[in-house]
Image (cartoon, helix red, strand yellow):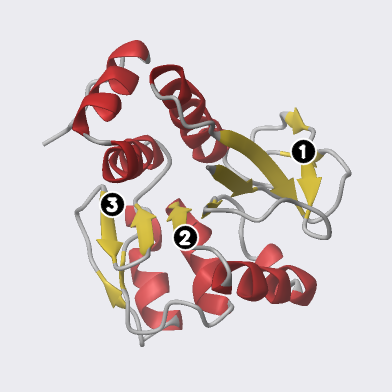
Amino acid sequence: MEVGIFIYDGAECLDFCGPFEVFNTAKRFIETPINVSLVAPSHVPVTSRGGMSVNPHYSIYSHPKFDLLIVVGGLHHQICGDHNVLNWLAETANHTSQCASVCTGVFLYAEAGLIDGKRVTTHWQDIDDLKEQYPSLEVVEDVRFIMDQNFTSSAGISAGIDMSLELVKKRFGQSIARKTATQMDYDWPRD
C-alpha cells in the first residue's frame, strides 16, 4: 500500500505527522507492506505553520502511484492558487483509489473540482468559508470525519488521527486499527 501525504509551506504539523504515524504504526501489525511518503510542490524543504522544516520524500513531479492520497490543511490560501499543484492533484486523485483531507486540506480538493456534491467536513473555524466558497458541497458540522464513497475528510488537526485509524480499519480490519491505536497510546474510538 502506497500512502502519499501532500504537504506545503504553512501546513499544520499534526495534520501530516498524525496520519504519518498511524500508517507507520499500523504496518507493524500486518504483512502487507505500507509505504508512507510526504509529497510537496518541489524537493525543497517545507516550512510548517509552526516553523518546523520538513524534507519531502517526493515532489509532485516524481512519486509512486498512490493507493491513498491525503492532503493536509494549514495556511492553505496560497497553495489553493497554485495551478501546478491543482493540476497535479486533479490528475493524481483521478488515478488514486482513496483520497482524504485533514482540516482545510478539503479546500484544495474543492478548488481542483474533485469533490462536487460530496459530504465533507473541515475545522470548525472554516466550516462557514467552505460552505460559502463551494456551495456544491454538502458540508457537515460537528463530526470528527466523514466518508463519502472514495473520499474521506476530517475536522481539524487531531481529527486526522481518528480519520486515519478509520481508514486503517476499513482496509485492514478493526483488530489492526485497535492495535495501532493502543500502540500509539491513543484513545480511540472517540464518541
Res 57 label:
1
Q: Bin the neighbour count of mark 1 within 10 Å (Cα to Cα): few under 14, some 14-19, many 20 and up.
A: some
Determine whether, in the image, residue 117 is placed left or right of residue 41.
Answer: left
Question: Is 8 placed above or below 160 here?
Answer: below
Determine whether, in the image, residue 4 is placed left or right of residue 125.
Answer: right
Nearer to the camera, 189 or 174: 174
Q: Position of residue 120 (x, y in %)?
A: 32, 67
* Residue under pointer 2: 99
Q: Is residue 7 visible?
A: yes
Q: Bin the neighbour count of mark 3 within 10 Å (Cα to Cα): few under 14, some 14-19, many 20 and up.
A: many
Q: Can you name the residue that lies furthest to the right here?
A: 44
Q: Position of residue 145 (x, y in %)?
A: 28, 51
Judged from the image, the secondary structure of the residue bearing numbered disc 1 is loop
For the C terminus, which image quadrant?
Answer: top left
Residues tagged 1 and 3 counted as in contact (Cβ below 8 A)? no
Quadrant of residue 125 within the rendered picture = bottom left
At 43% across and 29% down in the image, what residue appears? 22
Q: Can you name the residue that lies furthest to the front here?
A: 31
Question: Is 94 placed above or below 2 here?
Answer: below
Marks 3, 2: nearer the viewer: 2
Q: Position of residue 84 (x, y in %)?
A: 79, 72
* Residue under pointer 3: 145
N-term mark: 2 or 1: 1
Determine whether, in the image, residue 71 is placed left or right of residue 59.
Answer: left
CA separation in Å, label 3 and label 2: 13 Å
Q: Amino acid at mark 3?
A: Phe
Quadrant of residue 43 within the rendered picture = top right
Q: Amino acid at mark 1?
A: His
Q: Can you name the residue that lies furthest to the bottom here?
A: 136
Marks 1, 3: nearer the viewer: 1
Nearer to the camera, 137 or 98: 98
